[in-house]
Amino acid sequence: MSTADVALAPGPDEAAALPEPGRAPGAFGRFFRSELWLIFGRRRNWAGGLVLASVPLLIAVVVKVSGSGGGDTFVFAEITHNGLFVALAALTVELPFFLPIAVSAIAGDAVAGEANLGTLRYLLVTPVDRARLVLVKLGGITLFTLAATVLIAVVGAAAGLALFGGGTFTTLSGTSLGFAAGLGRLALVCGYLTLCLTGLGAVGLFISTLTEQPIGAGITLLALTVVSQILDQLSQVAAIHPYLPTHFWLDYAEVLRDPLDVGALGPGAASALAYVAIFTAAAWARFSTADVSA
């Protein structure tokens, strides 16, 4: 038996006291709210959120002080024409590293953190079975990912509109959209990136069931993310590119074309959903076979 299995195992008396799943009405909802409080109530996660929010502020201030466009990249060059592009630029900058760090920290802590603190076995005596526990953890990761992505977008849009205004929204196709349409495109980008990062979070959830060290689980997931991005740049391994978790992340640029082709996001969405399904099932299989009765 591994140390992780030992951390999962309640004593004989506790095992005998396990209630049948779902006996208490509303137990699942209370457990989910408790999970959200655990994630969003921690000071370290608030500190991480401040770091994420600082990037769009920094981009907006630097571009404003310089008095010129943000650079040759499209989303940076358009900042001075429409403040919404500050949000898009910040998401572009934070997507390769900062957002994966945030997701890795939460996903790695999902189960391993409970095992490390010795609280996991007490969670198992609540009227929530292990499949629901895994789903609660995945739901928490998903909402955190959405919150992190929206935080960057909202802070970036607010700072950008305050400093540069909200003129016409120029697309990659060269056409111009109104402010409301531009805001809708930004919302679609946030939704797509949330789905992609949730796929990464599902991998982290599985890793978290393999150890009782949350830092180790988080570092492992972050390392896998970096390796995936490196492999995605090597033409020698082009055959595996579509199967890498990070391969389709930058496809959000399709949202910035006119007319909008939502189907172009299909491969990325399918890849993310596949990662969610496969690794959530793997996390459940690992969790359900762990020795929790002796």
Image (cartoon, grey):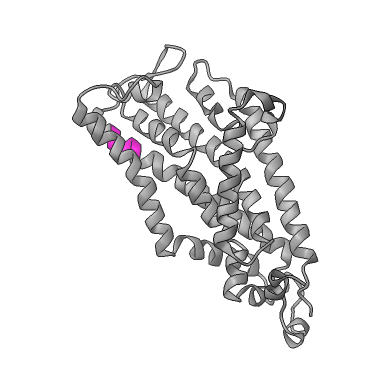
Viewer-nearest residue: 3 or 56 = 3
Q: Could you tell me residue 35's position as x and y percent?
A: 55, 64
The overriding secondary structure of the stretch rendered in magenta is: helix
Does residue 108 sit above or below 113 in this rendering?
above
Give the quarter of the figure containing the N terminus.
bottom right
Looking at the rendering, which quadrant does residue 13 occupy? bottom right
Residues shaded magenta: 156-160
- Image label count: 0
Q: Position of residue 259 (x, y in %)?
A: 52, 15
Question: Where does the image place residue 276, in percent across and percent down from the top left?
Answer: 68, 45
Residue 44 appears in the picture as rendered: yes
Is residue 159 inside the magenta stretch? yes
Residue 84 sits above or below residue 141 on the image: above
* Relative side of 254 to 243, left or right: left
Q: Magenta span has 19? A: no
Residue extending farthest top: 174
Q: Which quadrant of the figure contains the C terminus?
A: bottom right
Residue nearer the viewer, 289 or 33: 289
Identify the residue at image location x=31%, y=29%. Answer: 83
Residue at (43, 58) in percent of width and height: 45
Q: Tell me what residue is drawn at x 44 percent, y 64 percent.
A: 41
The percent position of residue 288, horizontal first and vertical second, equals 78, 64
The reply to whether residue 140 is visible in this rendering is no
The residue positioned farthest toward the front in the image shown: 236
* Position of residue 161 in the picture relative to residue 206 (left or right): left
Q: Is residue 91 above or below residue 123?
A: above
- To which quarter of the image does residue 131 belong? bottom right
**Residue 70 versus residue 106 in the image, above or below:** above
